[in-house]
Amino acid sequence: MRVIVFIFFIVFSLDARTITDDYGRVVKVPKHITKIYAASPPISMSLLAFNPDLLVALNSPFNEIQKKFVGSAYDKPVVGGFMGQGNTPNFEILISLKPDVVVMWGRMSGYEKILDKFKKFNIPVILVKNDTIYDLISQFGLYAKLTGDEARANELIAYTKESLNLVEQMQGELAKQKPIRYYFAEGVDGQYSECEGSFHLEPFKYAGAKNALDCKMSSNYGMEKISLETILLSDPDVIVAMEKSFVESIYDNPQWSTLRAVKEKKVFLVPSSPFNYISRPPSFMRLLGIRWLIDSFYPTLRANSFLDEKEEFFKLFFVQRKTDAN
């Protein structure tokens, strides 16, 4: 019996290796990894960008518009995820899919209990940082370690660094411009927003703009309720809105008519195809969102064509895999 156990241990060890995650944990993972479960939408999105074939399950389904951009991920089972407000995945379905590894945000509330649950099923869990856009770099690097595809990681990391350095390269020109104060309008009535410190606002920081609101976060989820009086007093230079219906109605709404952004017709709808450029989920699309914000706020500042940059972005991040039907 001891011989059998010993042989099993040797075989298992030969087929395993270790990865050190973003929180210093040494995790034993399979030598060959083809099925990864990302436990929340932002991480699922970075994995989608790296290689959609690796997603073993989805946090939420893709729609028809997104279908042609997500390759083989479109038909993967939907098991949910840890998405805040008490949401958890369907463990029964997830376990049946036998993921090689789970990738999870290390600051997730109650993550110790979650780790114990996966441990019972011998599924390794790697904790990653997902606090800033910059953390995309370490996520892409992790996927390279897990799969061996360093070339893919390197091209995505290079683009990420370039996007995050844009505002630094433009400091001289930005100093000549009037600083833009924005209001980020969420919800169909535009009266939900984000306060300083919210990672949902990161693209604005990298676009050289300042939040017109002076408020404090009540939770990481965001979408703080903002009174109309507060918005009117902030009088932003521009309004960046998430909902099309709000943008279409704001110019005919007398309650908003006194705002300079409305008077000067500087209300911008965040592009959302195939995924939102700014947030919900906060994904790799924010790298394109930074460029869109800069061009919306400072239309004469850059020589590059946004449409050309958009085409380049889509070619890089939505690579069609060999397993794609089309």
Image: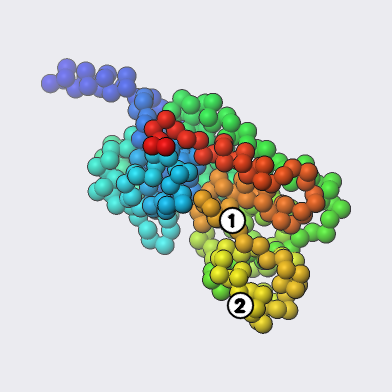
Q: Quadrant of residue 98?
A: top left
* Residue lying at the far bottom of the rendered structure: 254
CA separation in Å, label 1 and label 2: 25 Å
Q: Nearer the viewer, residue 165 or 13?
A: 165
Residue 165 falls left or right of residue 14? right
- How many numbered discs? 2
The residue that disc 2 covers is 227
At numbered mark 2, what does the secondary structure look like: helix, strand or loop?
loop
Give coordinates of residue 102: x percent, y percent.
38, 40
Quadrant of the rendered structure where residue 10 is?
top left
Residue at 46 percent of width and 25 percent of height? 148
Tell me the amino acid under the disc marked 2: Ser
Q: In this orientation, does residue 315 appear?
A: yes
Element at label 1? loop
| Rendering quarter of residue 183 | bottom right
Residue bearing the label numbered 1: 271
Applied colour scheme: rainbow
Q: Residue at 64% x, 79% y: name it.
A: 253
Q: Is residue 210 left or right of residue 243?
A: right
